[in-house]
Amino acid sequence: MDVLKVSGVKIRGIVACLPENILDNKAECSELFGEGVNTLIKATGINARCIANIGTSSLDLGVAAAKKLMIETGTSPEEIGAVICVTFTPEYLMPADAPAAQARLGIPNHSMAFDINMACSGYGYGLYVAAALTRALNKKVLLLDGDVQSAYVSRHDKATFPVMADIGTATMIEPDNTSDEWRFSFYTDGSRREALFIPAGGTKRPVQQNDLDYKEYEDGSKRRDIDIYMDGFEVFKFVAQDVSKFIARFMEEIKLSSESINAFVPHQANIYMIEQLAKKLKFKSDIVWKSGNEFGNPASGSVPLTIAKNAAEWFEQGKGGNILISGFGGGLSISVANIKLLSNGFYSIIHYGKGE
Amino acid sequence: MDKFLKFLAEIMEVNVENLSLQTEYQSIPQWDSLMHLRIVAEIEEKYGVEIPIDEVPDIKTLGDFYKYISNE
């Protein structure tokens, strides 16, 4: 196992921007699941999902979050040396979202701006690259992580519809020579990529007319080939077996005990899965941060969203910021990191289009 | 065992005559991946047992579930 280390950086703040709609999951899924909707909600623990209006992009949400973050942290655009967007749902297939973020936020033209397409594991990748760039540039780096998955989710699909959601987030990484070392590790199994993918629309299978038709499947689900397909069982198996083992190995490698961690911030796959994962890793339930019960699973943005939701109150209670974050999913891939959150950072959630 | 199958039939909304301990995952349309998690959660709650997450994907039949409660 390779452990990548970065020191001399800190997170100045994280803002998550919720899209326009917070939908009651039971009401939304009752048509698809009939009377089984109660046990569905119980098993997933997802009571509501945040969903964007058609035409609102993850970049819109991320830029709104970044504006709030820049105001609250007193960051001027000139101080930012690079912008990274972690997303698999950009506004256009080409060009990337990050150049548009640079323009919308007034970040200087001589800045680097690029996207990372990694689905649910993406925040760890983005944070590592952003931290390394912060060191290289000795400047602030803005990391936008978010997806509007609803554009690619069939409302008739039993695997994806009850869990998937939308979000935009912004994280500001800054140089700080006094900060603690961050440690990262990554895991990839591309042989299983078709367990979670969008079949049509890429160069392997350019969109044809019939890809826009809904096809019916054995479980009663209906979706188009331009929608996200998830083999729920394969993905669950990956989380239950590969992810839990990989995180345990990472902790062993960096000599981190479950008692020495202040908080565990997993990707919000669904509440049942993260609770079981935490149990397997011997984390006490009160240090597992959640947001999926209120907002659903918005892909990689779920980790910064969960930090934005929980951190301020956590620090108000005088608790520590030595945290373990992990994202896992599409690829299939895993990111895991042990980082330090600062109690004087800015952490907040805003609502898109509500004057913030 | 009959009570156990009746309990699962209610969760899956199928006729209990269609279920046995040999019934396999996905052999009936109601038992998909989300249902798999629902069954785990319902069994854990009703019988007060713990089914470790890394063992859940290896459960292939209703009999595999039954082992967790018959050991209690």
Image (cartoon, coloured by chain):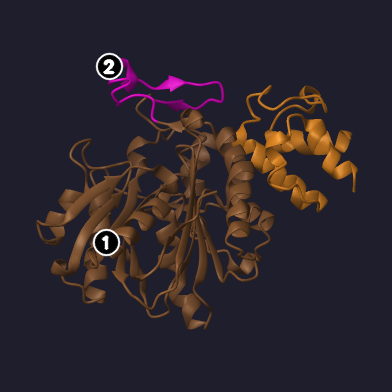
Q: Is residue A47 left or right of residue B41?
A: left
One can see residue B34 in this view: yes
Q: Which chain is orange?
A: B
Q: Which residues are magenta?
A: A198-223
Mark in the foreground, 1 or 2: 1
Indicate whether residue A89 is drawn in magenta: no
Mark 2 lies on residue: A209
Mark 1 lies on residue: A136
- Quadrant location, the C terminus of chain A: bottom left
Q: Which chain is brown?
A: A
Q: Residue at x 47, y 61 (%)?
A: A183
Are there few (<14), some (14-19), or many (20+) residues within 10 Å of tag 2? few
Where is residue A124 drawn, in percent x and y?
42, 54
Where is residue A290 drawn, in percent x and y?
52, 61
Task: Indicate the secondary structure of the residue bearing disc 1.
Answer: helix
How many marks can you see? Answer: 2
Q: Could you tell me the amino acid type at mark 1? A: Ala
Q: Quadrant of residue B57?
A: top right
Q: Residue at x 60, y 59 (%)?
A: A251
What secondary structure do most residues of the magenta stretch adopt? Answer: loop
Are there few (<14), some (14-19), or many (20+) residues within 10 Å of tag 1? few
Disc 1 to disc 2, C-alpha distance = 47 Å
